[in-house]
Amino acid sequence: MELKTKIIAEDGKQEIFIKREFNIPLELLFKAYSDPEIVSQWMGTNVLKLENIKHGSYQFETRNKNGDVVFEAHGSIHDIVPEQIIIRTFQMENTPFPAQIEFLTFEKISEDKSKITIQIIYKSVEIRDQMLKLPFAQGINLAHNRLEEIIGPSLLK
């Protein structure tokens, strides 16, 4: 099955691009990335903090069924322009991976369609390549599929 979310990674570069078109309006796509309750639903994680302001910050954590923390991430929001762009750092706790910078660009295609392009810049080509060895593409695809499933029915009412 072809993945709807595309990962573009050119050899020898320390960046990747993630692109996805959604069958939801731009304002709802942006809300899916900026509203803590919605982020929590489609990402399947607890949003401990999400300050969507310039110089804000965020913190996520995921726990297993026993209550053990299995994933923690945090970052700073450097800039945010509603329905246009979010510029932020992202760092996973308890991993060898350093912080990365992400540029999330939101684009209106039509009244009912929108697109996100995420440019992620890593500290080195080697780190980027290590990240790509993880089940990264499948994970972001599943999350984006959930985003579209959650947003479509619940917010279009």
Image: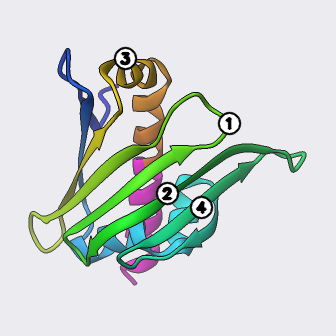
- Mark 2 vs 3, N-terminal side: 2
Q: Which residues are magenta?
A: 144-157
Q: Is residue 27 left or right of residue 107?
A: right
Examine the image and state in which quarter residue 140 appears: top left
The amino acid on which the numbered mark 3 sits, given as a three-letter code, is Glu
Residue sitting at 39 percent across and 30 percent down? 137
Closer to us: 19 or 4: 19
Marks 3 and 4, how far apart at CA:
26 Å
Q: What x and y, as percent, mark residue 95?
A: 62, 32
Marks 1 and 2, how far apart at CA:
14 Å
Rendered image: mark on residue 126? 3
Marks 1 and 4, how far apart at CA:
14 Å
The amino acid on which the numbered mark 1 sits, given as a three-letter code, is Asn
- Mark 2 vs 4, N-terminal side: 4
* Label 4 Cα neighbours within 10 Å, binned few <14 / some 14-19 / many ≥20: some
Q: Is residue 134 above or below residue 49?
A: above
Where disc 2 sits, the SS reads strand
Rendered image: mark on residue 148? none
Residue sitting at 46 percent across and 42 percent down? 99
Closer to us: 6 or 78: 78
- Mark 1 vs 4, N-terminal side: 4
Marks 3 and 1, how far apart at CA:
19 Å
Rendered image: mark on residue 75? 2
| Residue identifier under label 1 | 94
Label 3–label 4 contact, CB within 8 A: no
